[in-house]
Image (cartoon, rainbow, N blue to C red):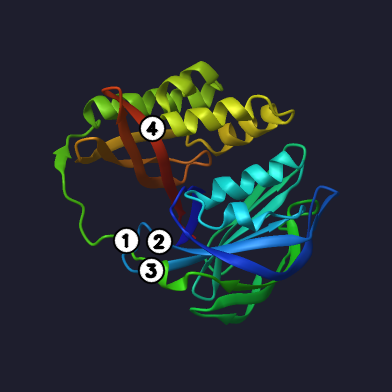
Amino acid sequence: MKRKVLLAFVAAMPVLAADNAGECRHHGQALNLIDGYAYRAPDEYAEGRMLVHVVLSSVALDRSVLVGAKEIDDAIREQVWDNDGGQVALTIDGNELTSLNAFLPPGTSASRSGTAFGDLSLKRSDDTGVAGTLRFEPEDKGDLGCDVRFDLKYTNAADAKAPAAARAGKPLPAGGGDAGKVFQANLAAMRKGDIPGLLATLNAEQAGKLRQDQNKPDFKAMLGMMQAFAPKSLKVTGGRDLGERAELDLEGQDQDGSPTSGMATMVKEGGAWKVERTSLKSTMGG
């Protein structure tokens, strides 16, 4: 069974990068990696399991901003894109690499996912940190390939918490009611690149970030990448109404036809539902 991470915005535990470097290449374009950051976060789909995330960047990162960031993926991405850089994000489950997502400026994105792909060699992966090397050969000539190393120490290791064992709340029907309608409107706007539609359906924090991104010179490329990762189809199978928040259970298809599932977190602002974050994973037989 192969597994691909599509969208994931999770509260995570930050770590301090110590030594990382390497290079990724895609269709003759090279990305020289000089800095990095890593964190551990709960696997939302396997209770009690922690995943290791390593992000390597072509630009120096300001860790004072990253430590304690509510959404670490977004915080890293903002620093990289603000400095016209690129990045490679690795997800490690135990001793296996399960996903690799790369962004090469000004607007090229590539990814690979599955179980135990690439030549990952971990020197250590414990409660104190993670270190190792990864050699990832392209499937075909010109496809994404990487050769990187990393050595990172965790901070605030005791702060990592497994997902809650149970989620209370009033059950939502298939479709998700009013919250589900807003979510589908948000998804439709994403597919179309409809900025007003996105702003109308995102919560205040996410909408504010989008407005800031609109002023960046590479915004068009950023939007194109988000559209490329939007699922082909997605339906709300149910969920939980928690009062001022709601969780929507999602099922559908990825762009390549792979089954995908996950959850959308909704919040009420001014009496109206808004999308706070969406987390999806797709599975492929093989």
Quick one: label 2, few (<14), some, or many (20+) residues within 10 Å?
some
- Asked whether the residues under the numbered discs 3 and 2 touch, taking CB atoms below 8 Å apart as contact, a structural biologist would say yes
Which type of secondary structure does the marked residue at label 2 adopt? loop
Residue 79 drawn above or below residue 51: above
Q: Which residue is mark 1?
A: 163
Determine the CA span between mark 3 and mark 4.
Answer: 26 Å
The reply to whether callout 1 and callout 2 are in contact (CB within 8 Å) is: yes
Disc 1 to disc 2, how far (Cα)? 8 Å
Give me the C-alpha separation between circle 3 and circle 2: 6 Å
Residue that badge 4 annotates: 275
In the rendered image, the vertical position of residue 266 relative to residue 155, given as above or below: above
> Do the CB atoms of the residues marked 2 and 4 lie less than 8 Å apart?
no
Q: Mark 2 = which residue?
A: 43
Q: Amino acid at mark 2?
A: Asp
Among the two numbered marks 2 and 4 on one chain, the one whose residue lies closer to the N terminus: 2
Q: Secondary structure at mark 1?
A: loop
Earlier-in-chain disc, 3 versus 2: 2
Q: Which is nearer the N-term, disc 3 or disc 4?
A: 3
Rendered image quadrant of residue 245: top left
Q: Which residue is mark 3?
A: 49
